[in-house]
Amino acid sequence: MHMVDNTLISDTVLEPFLREDNTAASKAKALLAQQKTVWELLRKGYESLDSVEIRTFDFGNYKIKVQFNPGRIVSSSAKVDAKSIKERKCFLCYKNLPAEQRGFQAEEDFLVLCNPFPIFTEHFTIPHVEHRPQQIRSSFDKFLSFARHLGKYYTIFYNGPKCGASAPDHLHFQAGNKFFMPIDSEYEAIKGSLGEKIIEDEKLKIYAVEKYPAKFFSFESSEEDSLKKAFDQLYVLLKEVMGSSEEEEPMMNILSSYEDNKWRVIVFPRAKHRPSYYFAEGDENILLSPASVDMGGILITPLEKDFRKITKENIIDIFDQVTLPKEQFNLISKKLVKAINF
């Protein structure tokens, strides 16, 4: 691990920025404050958030926001085909990080880094120290661990390799301020009015929420093992119903938060990477490449033309295109009940 040392911030440098304890959540806050003092690209990225505009669309039971964020053009328009990936240097490998960038090591083999192209007022990228594919199944325990250790301030999220990850070749998670995404604060109302509880025992609750535009399954538990087993079961069923090949991950975005000694994991199964608007010509074009944050109720538009013209109908259509059809979603829901209650 000694090769990563050049990227690690020393305790001496971080200490003046620590406002509270030495937990991962507090260290992340301190890291961002420190990095803003020495890394111009990051500082400019956060300054650009001051000019971000937001439109809010009220759908009654929930709200969906659209954010005009020009700084996200790099991510939204990223070429993620195999050829483009192969031809570029991986920007999450520590040896390719900008000279000013520093982070701290967490969960043994991950780095916590500040994202220089933020959506949130505090936005972190959490890459594995090794260059390995973006795959959640074998790293779901680490994902839960980050949700717990950063959960005081942040929601943790995962974008599948064909679901908004601009580095599909390098395992990483992200973290951003709690309650920034509408779903963080609307979750209870959404699951109550638009979903149904499909499983409940003393260790685990599972909801299937089919009437929210970004259909999702959610798990609630204070037991890591129960969550891992339930998620693994869902993973297998998604693969089976969606017909993913042996080595291919079923398409999904995941959000997780941790509060009152309990995890909440929201899984958005995906049917498609990008909606038809993304590829359309002329006036029909809307450059929007949905990832976890979009599924959580905040659509990111890097171009002003799209921000101004997008309508409620467009929003519903975009979600319809990129999420699972109702029939498939309900089939998975039924199979999940059988598999877990078996």
Image: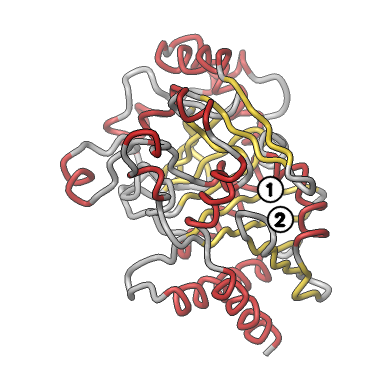
Looking at the rendering, in which quadrant would you find the N terminus? top left
Q: Position of residue 6 (x, y in %)?
A: 35, 27
Q: Position of residue 226 (x, y in %)?
A: 68, 71
Q: Position of residue 136 (x, y in %)?
A: 47, 59
Q: Residue at x 43, y 24 (%)?
A: 102
Picture quadrant of residue 265: bottom right
The answer to whether residue 114 is above or below residue 245 is above
Picture quadrant of residue 73: top left
Residue 241 lies left or right of residue 257; in this view the side is left
* Visual colour scheme: secondary structure
Residue picked out by circle 1: 257
SS of the residue under disc 1: strand
The answer to whether residue 327 is above or below residue 86 is below
SS of the residue under disc 2: strand
Residue 78 lies left or right of residue 226; in this view the side is left
Residue 35: in sight, yes or no? yes
Residue 317 lies left or right of residue 148; in this view the side is left
Residue picked out by circle 2: 264
Looking at the rendering, in which quadrant would you find the C terminus? bottom right
Evaluate if marks 2 and 1 touch, with contact meaning CB atoms under 8 Å apart.
yes
Q: Residue at x 52, y 54 (%)?
A: 253
- Which of the two labelled residues, at mark 2 and mark 1, occupies the earlier sequence position? 1
Q: Position of residue 289 (x, y in %)?
A: 43, 42
Mark 1 Cα within 10 Å, few/some/many (few <14, many 20+)? many
Residue 207 lies left or right of residue 138; in this view the side is right
The amino acid at mark 1 is: Ser
